[in-house]
Every structure is written in structure tokens, then in C-alpha cells.
């Protein structure tokens, strides 16, 4: 049975809510600024690696869990379909490894969930391709195993991480780490912003705009 809400949303309540909005959005903006100032060269290097791989006929595989899975799909869609309507270009080969529910559930059931992304990387990845792992903790076991598999099979690896980068950081050739203290939502906001900048840079580096 639902409980009645007893709180009053008077002027003081509205003020508190508005303060929450300001605090949250301004903190997010400051965190993005920190990431930009600390990682601008790294982000450009990521874009160069991806654009070079596309030019050479390779592809980008992306994996993550939960909100990071959604971000993987988001970025893959903007590469394969389009990022901005003002830029007319060919489709770019990016695959989010979190989209096939049959493969994910079969892998989880038959091999263990920690192995699902590595198995899909084995299916789709080839030497010279890139595997991009997303993890707000930096310690997602299935993302870690996917990067380990990719490195050992001639693929390039990169990561968007949170906290101190965790164990995944050591398996990435290049990475951006968003500092935080348990706030995965803010990390995800930075990851998608970095992903968007990378896509814009890739389009410029490949001569599409």
C-alpha cells in the first residue's frame, strides 16, 4: 500500500530543489572542465587511433554494463548512422557488444557473465581493430576480460573509466579516467561528453567536416 507523502513543497521546499538543480549541474560542469583540462591530449590521441583504424578498414567494438551499456549503444549508433545532420558521410563501423540479448543471456548462462564481452570480442574482433571499454568503477570483470582478450589477440584497447581507473586501466593502451567518489552518474555524464568530442574529432580527421 502506497504511503501518503507528507512533505510540503512550499517556497522553502522549492528553493531547496532549485539549489539541488544548481549544485548538481554546476558540479557536473566543473567535473567536465577538470576532465577536459587533464585529458585533452589523450582525447585527441583516442580520436586519432579510431580514425586511423577506420581508414585502414578496421572497426570499433564498445562494451559496458548498465548505463555504460547504454552509452556504448549511443556512441555506436552515432558512428554507424550519424552524429550531426549537418555532416554527410559514410557509415563508420562501430559495434556495441551489449545489444544482442540472446548472445548476452546465452553467454551468461553457458560461460558466465564475466566472459560475455570477451566471447563477443572473439567473434567480431580482428587484429588491428579497437576495443573500447566503459566502466564507472574501472573494475567491471566482463569489461576487464574483454580488454585482456583484445590485447592478447592483436587488437588496440582504450577505456573510459571512473575513480582511479581500477584494474581495467592497466589493460588499456590509452584511457580517460574521471575522478569521483562514488558518483557513477556524474562519471557517465563525462563519458558521453568525451565520446561526443571523440566522434566530432574523428569526423574532422577523416575529412568529413
Image: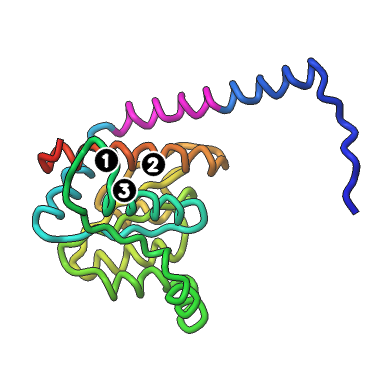
40 displayed left or right of 66: left
Q: Is residue 26 magenta?
A: yes
Q: Nearer the viewer, residue 102 or 67?
A: 102
Q: Earlier in the sequence, mark 3 or mark 2?
A: 3
Q: Earlier in the sequence, mark 2 or mark 1?
A: 2
Residue under circle 1? 198
Taking the spot 25% from the left edge, 52% from the top edge, the residue there is 173
Crowd tier of the residue under label 2, counting other residues whose Cα lies within 10 Å: few below 14, some 14–19, many 20 or above: many
The coloring applied to the image is rainbow
Mark 3 vs mark 2, CA separation in Å: 22 Å
Query: Does the rendering let one see residue 42?
Result: no
Taking the spot 32% from the left edge, 62% from the top edge, the residue there is 147
Q: Comparing marks 3 and 1, which lies closer to the viewer?
A: 3
Q: Earlier in the sequence, mark 3 or mark 1?
A: 3
Q: Comparing marks 2 and 1, which lies closer to the viewer?
A: 1
Residue under circle 3? 78
Crowd tier of the residue under label 3, counting other residues whose Cα lies within 10 Å: few below 14, some 14–19, many 20 or above: some
Amino acid at each position: 500500500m502506497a504511503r501518503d507523502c507528507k512533505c510540503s513543497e512550499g517556497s522553502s521546499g522549492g528553493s531547496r530543489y532549485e539549489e539541488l538543480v544548481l549544485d548538481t549541474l554546476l558540479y557536473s560542469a566543473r567535473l567536465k572542465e577538470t576532465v577536459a583540462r587533464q585529458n585533452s591530449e589523450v582525447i585527441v590521441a583516442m580520436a586519432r587511433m579510431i580514425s586511423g583504424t577506420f581508414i585502414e578498414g578496421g572497426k570499433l567494438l564498445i562494451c559496458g554494463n548498465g548505463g555504460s551499456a547504454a552509452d556504448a549503444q549511443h556512441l555506436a549508433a552515432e558512428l554507424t548512422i550519424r552524429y550531426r545532420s549537418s555532416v554527410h558521410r559514410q557509415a563508420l563501423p562501430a559495434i556495441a557488444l551489449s545489444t544482442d540479448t540472446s548472445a548476452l543471456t546465452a553467454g551468461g548462462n553457458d560461460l558466465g557473465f564475466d566472459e560475455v564481452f570477451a566471447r563477443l570480442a572473439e567473434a567480431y574482433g580482428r587484429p588491428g581493430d579497437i576495443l573500447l571499454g566503459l566502466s564507472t568503477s574501472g573494475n567491471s570483470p566482463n569489461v576487464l576480460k574483454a580488454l585482456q582478450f583484445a590485447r592478447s589477440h592483436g587488437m588496440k584497447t582504450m577505456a573510459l573509466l571512473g575513480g582511479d581507473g581500477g584494474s581495467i586501466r592497466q589493460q588499456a593502451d590509452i584511457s580517460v579516467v574521471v575522478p569521483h567518489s562514488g558518483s557513477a552518474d556524474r562519471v557517465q555524464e563525462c563519458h558521453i561528453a568525451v565520446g561526443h568530442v571523440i566522434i566530432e574529432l574523428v569526423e574532422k580527421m577523416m575529412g568529413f567536416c
